[in-house]
Image (cartoon, rainbow, N blue to C red):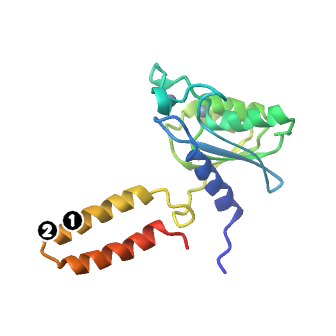
Amino acid sequence: MNRISWDQYYMAQSHLLALRSTCERLAVGATIVRDKRIIAGGYNGAISGGTHCIDEGCYVIDNHCVRTIHAEMNAIIQCAKFGVPTAGAEIYVTHFPCLQCCKGIIQSGIKAVYYAVDYKNHPYAIELFKQAGVSVEQVELEEMIIDTKNKEKLQLLASLISRLSEAGVQEEEIKELYEQANQLFTSYT
Ligand SMILES: [Zn+2]
Ligand SMILES: [Zn+2]
């Protein structure tokens, strides 16, 4: 039996949360963990009850969408809202935290940051994490756990199938391949 590691489990959770993002510029997810328990999670989006970027477009100032609260801050604020201590906790994020989130993470007492994807890694953020004794480590999500490229795979499939048809492969054969691939890519059972 292939058992999923804790790192992959938390990172997968952050990638799931990112799918809830309402900002079109970047979808980020964050999971806060303490003593191997998930204590909070967040994604980047508008304030509760606010206008979503996906409905009315991003509100961009100086090349940043100011409508949204970032995933890391949302997760930390969720802890504040419900009185859950973050001191000594760890955070799993899909992308390297921005400078503002970096400061929030440090100030909340979080001791370790695990991120999946490099994203404009700001040298000052790296320096601040170092100064504060917060360990930072890249943990890439193993694709097999959550297929974040499913849409691209289906698009590739569709273009391959149309090329087969152009190349003169029999309709029946194409239909069979299409059904097989469809089963593989879209079914979870
Ligand atoms: Zn936005
Ligand atoms: Zn941020």
**Left of 174 or right of it: where is 72?**
right
Q: Position of residue 118 (x, y in %)?
A: 51, 45
Residue drawn at 54 percent across, 30 percent down = 52
Q: Which mark is residue 116?
A: none
Where disc 1 sits, the SS reads helix
Q: Position of residue 47 (x, y in %)?
A: 64, 27
**Residue under pointer 2:** 166
Q: Position of residue 114 (x, y in %)?
A: 65, 49
- Above or below, 55 against 186 in this view is above
Quadrant housing the C terminus: bottom right
Q: Are marks 1 and 2 in contact (CB under 8 Å)?
A: yes
Judge: label 1 CB < 8 Å from ligand 1. Answer: no
Q: Residue placed farthest to the top in the image?
A: 61
Q: Is disc 1 surrounded by few (<14), some (14 to 19) or many (20+) residues within 10 Å?
A: few
Residue drawn at 53 percent across, 38 percent down = 121
User: Nearest the camera: 117 or 161?
Assistant: 161
Count all numbered tags in the image, as a single digit. Answer: 2
**Residue under pointer 1:** 162
- Above or below, 48 against 86 in this view is above
Quadrant housing the N terminus: bottom right
Residue drawn at 67 percent across, 29 percent down = 48
Give the distance between the C-alpha atoms of the residues marked 1 and 2, in whole angstroms: 6 Å
| Amino acid residing under circle 1 | Ser
Where disc 2 sits, the SS reads helix
Q: Quadrant of residue 177?
A: bottom left
**Left of 60 or right of it: where is 181?**
left
Judge: label 2 CB < 8 Å from ligand 1. Answer: no
User: Nearest the camera: 21 or 75?
Assistant: 21
- Above or below, 89 against 166 in this view is above
| Amino acid residing under circle 2 | Glu
Residue drawn at 65 percent across, 33 percent down = 102
